[in-house]
Structure formats: structure tokens, C-alpha cells
Amino acid sequence: MEYAAGIDVGSTQTKAVLLDASRAIVARALINTGANVKRAGQTALDTLLSQSGVAKEAVGFVVGTGYGRYKIEAGNAQVTEISCHARGAQLLFPGTRTVIDMGGQDTKAIKVGPEGDVLDFCMNDKCAAGTGRFLAGAAEVLGLSLDDIGEISLRGTQPIRLTSVCTVFVESDILGYVAQKRKMEDILAGVHQAIASRTIGLVRRVGMEAEFTFTGGVARNMGMVRALEAKLDVTLNVSPDAHFMGALGAALFALDHVLAGRSVVPAAADVPAEWVTG
Amino acid sequence: MNYDAIVQHCRELLEMLPAQAVARAREKHPDVRGLAVFPVYAPVEIIHAAKLMPVGLFGVGNKLEISHADSRFQSFICSIAKSTLELFLRNETDGIEGVVFSSICDVARNLASLVKRNAPQLLVEYLHLPQNMGNSGSAAYTRAEFERFRTNLAAHIQRPITDASIAASLDVYNKVRHLIRALYARRKEHPGSIPTADLYAVVQAGTRMMPEDYLPILEAFLSEARRRNPRPRDSVHVVLEGAFCEQPPALLIDTIEGAGCQIKDDDLVVGFRWFQEHVGCNGDAMGALAEAYLHCSVYSSVRHDWRHRRTEGLLRRVQDAGAAAVVFTPAKFCEPALLDYVPFVEVLDKNKIPHIKLEFEEKMWTFEASRTEVETFSESMLFE
Amino acid sequence: MSTAVADVKDYRGRVHNLSSRIMTDWMTQLKQAAASGSPSAYLMISGNCVEILRCFDILPVFPEINALQLAIRKKSLPYIIKAEEIGYASDNCAYVKADIGFTLSGGVGKDGNIPVPSMIVCNFVGCNVYIKWFEHCAAMFNCPLVMIDVPFVREGDRPCPGDVAYVMSQLYDLIHQCEELTGRKFDIDKLREIMRHSARAEEGWTRCKDLCKRRPAPFDAYFDSINMMGPINALRGTREAADFFDAAVLEYEEMVQRGEGVLPEEKFRIVTEGPPPYPYYRNFRSLFETWGAVAVQSTYSTVGGTWEFGFRHDPDRPLESIAEQMLVHNLCNRTLTERYAQIRRYVEEWDADALVIHSIKSCRLFSAGQGDMREYFTKELGVLTLMVESDLEDPRYYAEAQMKNRIDAFFEALQYKRIRGAAHAAAAKG
């Protein structure tokens, strides 16, 4: 049996996925990147091996992605996370035409072809407006945990309007609303809506084509999922592995190399059902 | 109408989108359609003579959510450009024939192209207003540019725009400008008789109705204002500079006056108050407009005139107003205002005139930070 | 990180050495003028009337080039900060800030590299910021400011009635000012001679650009064009600049004959829009080289003039043709939608695979609305378009990792598209 690994070294977390030749996920790893990017990549790979019991030599190819992709010593090749998210999303949801990837630093809208190829993409401009970092800023001002704010926002009935989605101004804006005694859930609903509208701006740039698959760390935030769905007026594909999507795509690219010499290529539809929620 | 009713009426008009203001005007003038005017100056007389209502476009960022325009304009572009484009991308233009832009800055210039491309059904005019006031060819050029505008407008509405009708419109707008100057003079002489936020609403609302309907409102407001004579407060008399294009939220103005400053002169809505004196016609209204632009325009960050530098203009304004300080209110990302800030500050420092800068954006609604700054500023001056 | 200066001089071929030599000669003249106080004038690059200054032997000084050189030598930031200290905003054009900061630091004047201008010619062509910049300079140096207000091309692609006459009447003013400054009479025959040099340089520049229609392209029409923009924009009207382009044509024709391109392998042909990030010029270039991407045309190379579409200065109609060039035949004075048309011609006639937009914060003339340009090319023309952001002068806006990520993803997509296209073609063949 041959295996392929994908390692996604992000600014805060490093994610890794090990695939077997049938494209089944054999192991996942999630660790904090920390200051030593090189070590994070290695630790993630080691975790995959120890979890799965697969021998190092059995891993035929490793593809690195994410901002730290060039620092992964075990990486045989590097692919950007844009290509990887497209590839991963297409495996889990073959009908995907648009990927919305929301991470800590970047939000991306990716237009995807039927084979998981990137047809076009757009990313947020230089400021962190409308990214996970913006959410983190809002959570911090309110003294809440980043993991909770999505759920809380869902209870909002009268969302506030933000002046801008500038990470610098959000603090004074939110404090202004707190001073007005607006409810926490309404403030958070407003924050989520503001990011959602900004994200729609990105999606519009590549064209609004269903199905939409939501990936990246923020996809675990139900408040964000619902806010985007409301703006887009569709149901988003969201996998519990949403934050592993970059690593999964990288592993798929790695598997291409492993399988390059073979004639049998597994079909994209052969995906175990437990990965997918609709 | 009494003072408060007038202010209230004007605020209502300003709450409307431009198309809604046109619809309101059509209740009284069923045949009237609007022509939107992007700041700063435009020859509104020609528009009015075409039986169109010049409608001020001051940004609608506090009314429309920007969801289309930010895919066209980057994050470092001012909010009025974005919200104006949003308005046109969403086709919020019922009853509006078109829009006129002018050569105020690089962003407005590109915005004109974008509107033209994305709203092809509209008449989109771009005026290159002269930046050389003193050349022997300046008068002929300016006149030719105004004539071109008239020709294009007439072709679009398929009606001639006669010299006589332009002369009549010039007369109406002369009266409007005269009354606004009188209001400004009243505020200057009796600070507090017209809170600036009220004056601002009344002046800006003039860009939301036909000028002939505006005149009686201005007259009534002036006579109401002349009756009011509140006791002067202990405050720092200031001049406002820098909000000539994108207009600040009224709350910012209130904040400034509520935090210890009394505004004695400003450049709010300046494009509609552009000429500093009566524009004589002498049987040639187009010539008069061109001459007035070259020789009777107010100093402005969007007009180069090395004969009368803007630094002198600001200094004179401060002196004429008897002001003790300047509050700069540039819109965020506004290049003309932000670049002029440097020589302005230099001349103020040289003349020992204190100043403070408050940047704003259309959508801002909380000015707590500004209030603290202005309070500190005015306290430092009052208790010196 | 390696220093950009060394990298930029590490150039391919004779063109770069020649360019560097004649530009250095000019720089030496500037330094000499700074010391001697001989007549010089500030001028804007775009749609400039350098021929008239040359006619009076007034040395042209281009603050844009000063700022550019500070950036490419990685010296711009302290000057930008110096300007911000006296009140320039972080949102103001960093070219202005670097130049003003440099001036305030003694870079201009007797002991500096740049002469204090005898006058400032504000050939206002498109860029509104320029008016302020030159006003500030005129106030700093207390020298005359000659305004040449060039009406924007606002109806299609030609001037409006009255525009040419207005510009010409201002050119007469300029000539008068030059006469006063130098005490010399205007010599129209000398101007004609200068314009013949201009036209020859314009012809050579056009032929060079045309050679980029060939596969592989003999030079990169974005990055290598920078070395030809000095001669065409700043040194135009001199015999040396005209000779330079004759030499460039020769070199590039030889390369085309040998089938030699600027890169070992030309994999992708791109058109670029917007100025480059000078503070990271070499790094930025290498992000494209890695992918075998060559710019076959660029809008930035036409800020001074759109010569490739046929316009030449005409010695038989000297002032009129100068006025026409300032008005119509340069990128900066034309509408954004005219720029779309220009890029479209580039993509089609130069046979490019994609469009790359480098959106810079400093220059709104260039960048405001480029999202709409992207929209037009991707949605209406189906041209794969990448938009990246940084700045042409301020190093603080360049984020290498973000930049690389976007560029890599873009070429991954292009490559995939090509592989798939080839696979489908092979499948169709059976």
C-alpha cells in the first residue's frame, strides 16, 4: 500500500492529512504552528505516522501548502492553498463550483471547475477586514472566546450595523454599541453579517455559481455559516473536516504523484460518507 | 414653517436616496427629472435651464450597504466613491437622467468611467474644469467646456437649452447663493443663532429640490434665524476646512459644536455655494458663468489658482470669521484634502493659529473619540 | 535579501548597459546643474513637453524618477516617514512623500544630486496629485510655477473642441517663460530638430515593442521596459536617446532571429497593468520568472506615450503635435475604459495568456476601479486575470508571502488549464 500526505502550515495552526491510494483519509493531525514553522511541519507528519502506524517509507509523496509551505523539509513539492482547497472541496462535494475559504489571515473565493481545477480566485485585499482575525478582534473586545461567538450570534434578533469592517475601527464601534446597552448577540450578529457581506463581495468577483462549499477554520463557526447562507440565499456545503481542506487537497496532489505510474485512478465519487455533512 | 419645522423638513429630504428626492419633487413638478451632480462644482444653471433638477450626490454610505462597489474599488478608496458607484450598480436611479462629474481628483475621474460603463442607460458627463485661471486661452476654454455640456445635455433631452433660460436660471441661483451667504453671515455675526448642524441641513437640502421651491424656504429660515438670538456660549471660534466633497455626518458637526467649539465658517456643500458674489449676466449667461468660474470661485482644494493661493484663502477665511482655530475635517482617503493639509498647517503654524484634524467616513455613527479630542482641544484654548 | 541595485544592474544584454550609461550621463548633468545653478525645470513624466525645455537647453528634472530611484535603491522609507512627520497622511501618494522628504533632507540643491529648479512646469496630464506636489515644490523653492492644464480626454479617444487651442496657448506661455529665464529667443528650427530625434526614438521604441509579439519575446515588456522608459520619457529629443533605440532594435531583432527569449523558457505570456513595486522590484520580478512568465506588453510603459499605436512628434507641426501628444497619446490622460481597450489590444495582438494587475495604493489614477477592470476581463472577455496589491514606493505595503501565494496560485491555475487543454486535445485526437 502506498500513501500520500498533505501538510498545511497556516499562521496559527498546522493541519495534515494522510491518504491511502483509494483517497481514503487514514489520519489527520492538528497542531499549533508556534514560532518554529519547520518543526510544526515535521511534528504534523510524525503525528500522522504514529496515529496510523504507517511507516515513513510508505509515504510516497508529501505536498506542503499554506504560508509555511516552503519551510516543510519533508515536502516534496509545494502547492498554494488556493489550489488545495479547490481540490479538497471537489473531492468531498463533487458539485462544488465555488469555494469560500475563510482562515485567520485570508478570505478567498475560488471558482472551481468540474475536475477541482481553479478557474479564478479572489482574496481579501491587504487589510485583515473580513477574515478570522477580525472575528478574533471582536471576540476579544467583548471578552468572549472565539469558539463561542458564532453560537451567540445566532440568537441575535436585531443585528447592529458596523461602520466598517476595519479591524482598527471595529473596537470603538463595538464599544459604542456596548455603551448603548445593545445585546451581545445583536452585536455579534452584526459582526458576522458585516463579514458575510464583505465575503459576498469577493464571491461576486469570481461569479456566484452553486454549489458553494465553505472551508477553512472559520467554517466551524455556525454563526458565520448561517450569515453567509442568508446573504447567498443557498445552503452551503460544510464538512466537519472543513479546516483540513487545504491539507486534504495537498494530499490529493501528492497522491497524483504517487499514482502517476499507475493506470487505475479512483473516481472522485468514492468518498466515505461519514466525511460529508450537507 | 418655523425654524424647527424647516430643519426637520430638510433632514427628511436628506434621509432620502437621490431618486426618492426626485420623486418627491415630481409631486409638484410632474415633468421634472433629475440630473445627479457629483461634488464639487457643476454649472447647475445649465442643468436647471434644461428643466432638470440638479440633485446633489453626497454619498449614500449610511443608507445603502456597500455590497457591489467594493468589488470594483479597493479598500483605500474614499467612501463617497464607493457608495455612489453602489447606487448606480443597483440602478437606484428612477427619474434620474444622468450624472455629471468633474476633474476634482483621480478617483472621481475613474468613477465617472465606471458609472458610464456600468450604467449605459444614463447620460454620464465629465467636465474638465480649468486648472489654469490666468492664461489667455482660459476664458475661451472654460466657455467651450460649458457649451459642450449644454450641447450634450440638450441632445440627450432632445430639447434646446436657450440662452434666455440659462439667464433665468442664473437669476434663480444668484438668489439662492445670496440667501445662503446671508445665512452664513448671520451665523458669523451671532454665533449660536444657527447651530451649524441646522445650517448644514438647510444648505444641503437645497440640492434635493427645485431651486424655485428652495427660495421661500431659505427666506423663511433666514427670517427665523434673525429672530433667534441665544446668549453666546463660552467657546472657541473655529473654521471648518476639508469637507468639500464627501459630506461628514451631521453628528460630527454636532459633536464639534457640543464639545466647546463654535463654527463660524466652513466649506460644507461648498460646490453649491461656489461663487462668492452675484454673477452678473449682461445678456451672455454662458460667458458670465465661465468668467465667474475663473474669477469669482471660492478657494478650493480641487482648483489650482496660483494667483490666489489656498493658504491665503484659508488665512483670510479665519480672519474674516474672527476665528481662533481651524478644525480640519477631511474625509478618510480624500487626497485633495489630505495633501492640502500640509501647506495649510504650515501657514497656520506660522501665524500661531491652533488646529486639529478629525478624519471621517460616511458610515461613521459614533464620534466619542472625536468628542474627546475636540474637548481637549477647546479646553486647552479656553483655559490658556 | 539581496540588494535591488546590484540586481537591477545585473542586466541581460547591451540595452541595459546602454540605458544605464545614458541615464547616468543625465544624472551627472543633474548633479553638475545642482552645483552650478544652470537652468533646470521640474516636469511630470506623463505627456511631457520636454522638447520645449530642450530647445532652450533647460535641463529637465523629473521628481517621479527621483522617487523611483530612491525606492529601487531601498532608500525611500526614511524620506516617506520624514514627510509624514510634517503632516502628509499615510494615505497620500508615497512618490510625493519620498520626494518631499528627500528635499527636506537636503537632497536637492548645491550639495545634493538634484538641482533646485529654476522653474516648475506643471504639465498636469491626468494626475491631480501632481498639481499639489508641484505646488508644494514651488512653495518650498520659491520658484515660478508654470501651469499647463491639459484637459482630460473625456469623449472617446479624441480631444474636445477647444482643447488643442487651450493647450497650445499655454505652451506659448511656457515658451515665453523659457525666453525670460534664459534670455534667449525661441528657435523653432531647433525645436524641429529636437522633434526629429523624438520621432526617431518613438519609432525605435515601437519596433522594440512590436518584437514582443514574437515567441519567445526578446525582452520583458514590463520589467525590461523600465530601462527604456528613461530614454523615451526623460531623454526624448536627444540624439543619444534616438541612437539608443536604434541599438535596442538591433539587439532584439538579433535575439528574435536566434529564437532567443528573455527567459530560458517562455511558458506564459502576460500583459501587466500598473506600476511595479519598486522597493521589491527584483523579488517581484522573480516571482514571475519562476513560472516562466514574460510580460509581452504593459500599460505602465505607456504613461509617457502610447507610441505603439502610431503617434509621432511631427517636426512640421511642432507645437500642435506636442499639444496632441500631451492630450491624447499617453495613458494617463485617457479614461479607464480607454485603458481597457488598450489592454484588450495587448492581449489579442500580443497573444497573451493572462492579465496581471498590480494595484498600488499610492497612485489612484492608476488603481482606483481596477476591480471593475478585473470584472471586465474575466467576465466579459474570459481573460484570466490576477490582481495583487502593494505600492510603487512605500515598502510597508509589500507582503512577500501574500504576494507569492497569489502569484503561485494564479500560475498553478493557468498551468492546470493548459495541461487539461492538452489532455482534452489528445483525447479528441484519439
Image: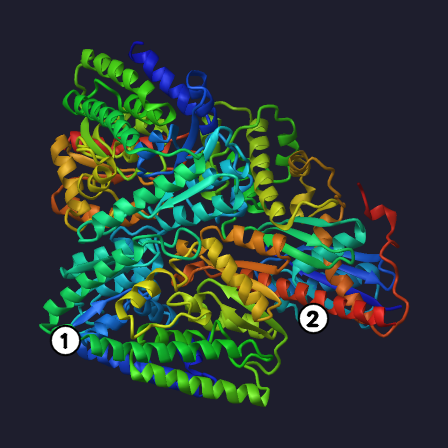
Residue nearest the viewer, comparing B329 with C87: B329
- The image shows residue C43, relative to residue C154, as above or below, that is below
- The image shows residue A237, relative to residue A271, as above or below, that is above
Assign a secondary structure to mark 1. loop
Occupied quadrant, residue A76: bottom right
Q: What colour scheme has been applied to the protein in the rendered image? A: rainbow
Assign a secondary structure to mark 2. strand
Question: In the rendered image, which residue does mark 1 sit on?
Answer: C38
Horizontal and vertical percent for residue B253? 31, 28
Occupied quadrant, residue A238: top right
- The image shows residue C131, relative to residue B54, as above or below, that is below
B55 on left or right of B262: right
Which three-letter amino acid code belongs to the residue tagged 1? Ser
Which three-letter amino acid code belongs to the residue tagged 2? Ala
Question: In the rendered image, which residue does mark 2 sit on?
Answer: A77
Could you tell me how far apart the alpha carbons at marks 2 and 1 are, in whole angstroms? 60 Å
Occupied quadrant, residue B230: top left
Residue nearest the viewer, comparing B68 with B257: B68
Q: How many marks?
A: 2
> Of tags 2 and 1, which is closer to the observer?
1
Horizontal and vertical percent for residue C154? 39, 51
- Judge whether residue B285 can be spotted in this image: yes
